[in-house]
């Protein structure tokens, strides 16, 4: 297992006169969609690709439904997925209005320890830009 990366020069947005610094950035080499994920899982089970794909599509729908119902979803040792709202604060409880004080609704994903530990052993391979 390995992650490809490239090195990029970036300016400090808070100090445009400061010299550039160099940072590593992961290079995504490809994307795995539900079909490819189903095929990979099917290699390790007695189930067919169609069965696995059906389960993954149902999982996708169940996660979306849970999030839109205000629930958090725990995906085993992978991550927690949960809805979040944010916006400017109100001076008093009586002044608070969701229409005014909730300006952003989004989904947050927090990785779990098992997933984080798996990244510790990944090799890094430098790619030229």
Image (spheres, rainbow, N blue to C red):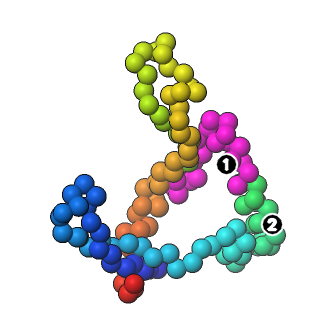
Badge 2: residue crowd in 10 Å (few <14, some 14–19, many ≥20): few
Q: Residue at x 28, y 58 (%)?
A: 13
Q: Examine the image and state in which quarter residue 48 appears.
A: bottom right
Circles 2 and 1 in contact, beta carbons < 8 Å: no
- Say what secondary structure mark 2 lies in: helix
Q: Position of residue 108 (x, y in %)?
A: 52, 48
Q: Position of residue 87 (x, y in %)?
A: 47, 34
Q: Which residues are magenta?
A: 60-80
- Say what secondary structure mark 1 lies in: helix
Badge 1: residue crowd in 10 Å (few <14, some 14–19, many ≥20): some
- Mark yes or no: residue 125 visible: no
Image height check: is 99 above or below 79?
Answer: above
Q: Residue at x 55, y 44 (%)?
A: 106
Q: Is residue 67 magenta?
A: yes
Q: Position of residue 54 (x, y in %)?
A: 79, 62
> In the image, 34: left or right of 17?
right
What residue sits right under mark 1 in the picture? 63
Q: Is residue 127 magenta?
A: no
Q: Examine the image and state in which quarter residue 27 appears.
A: bottom left
Report the quarter where the C terminus lies. Answer: bottom left
Find residue 40 and name its label: none
| 2 vs 1, front mark | 1
> In the image, 33: left or right of 118?
right
What residue sits right under mark 2 in the picture? 51
Residue placed furthest toward the bottom: 128
**How far is the residue under mark 2 from the one under mark 1?**
18 Å
Q: Residue at x 67, y 40 (%)?
A: 68
Which residue is at the front of the view, 89 or 110? 89
Q: Position of residue 64 (x, y in %)?
A: 68, 47
Which residue is at the front of the view, 19 or 127? 19
- Mark yes or no: residue 94 visible: yes
């Amino acid at each position: 297992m390995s992650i490809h990366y490239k090195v990029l020069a970036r300016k400090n947005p808070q100090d445009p006169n400061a010299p550039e610094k160099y940072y590593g950035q992961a290079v995504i080499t490809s994307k795995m969609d539900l079909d490819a994920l189903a095929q990979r899982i099917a290699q390790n089970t007695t189930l067919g690709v169609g069965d696995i794909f059906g389960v993954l599509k149902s999982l996708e729908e169940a996660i979306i439904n849970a999030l839109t119902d205000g629930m958090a979803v725990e995906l085993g040792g992978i991550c927690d997925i949960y809805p979040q709202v944010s916006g400017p604060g109100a001076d008093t409880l009586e002044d608070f209005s969701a229409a005014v004080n909730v300006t952003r609704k989004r989904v947050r994903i927090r990785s779990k320890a098992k997933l984080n530990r798996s990244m510790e052993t990944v090799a890094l391979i430098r790619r030229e830009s």
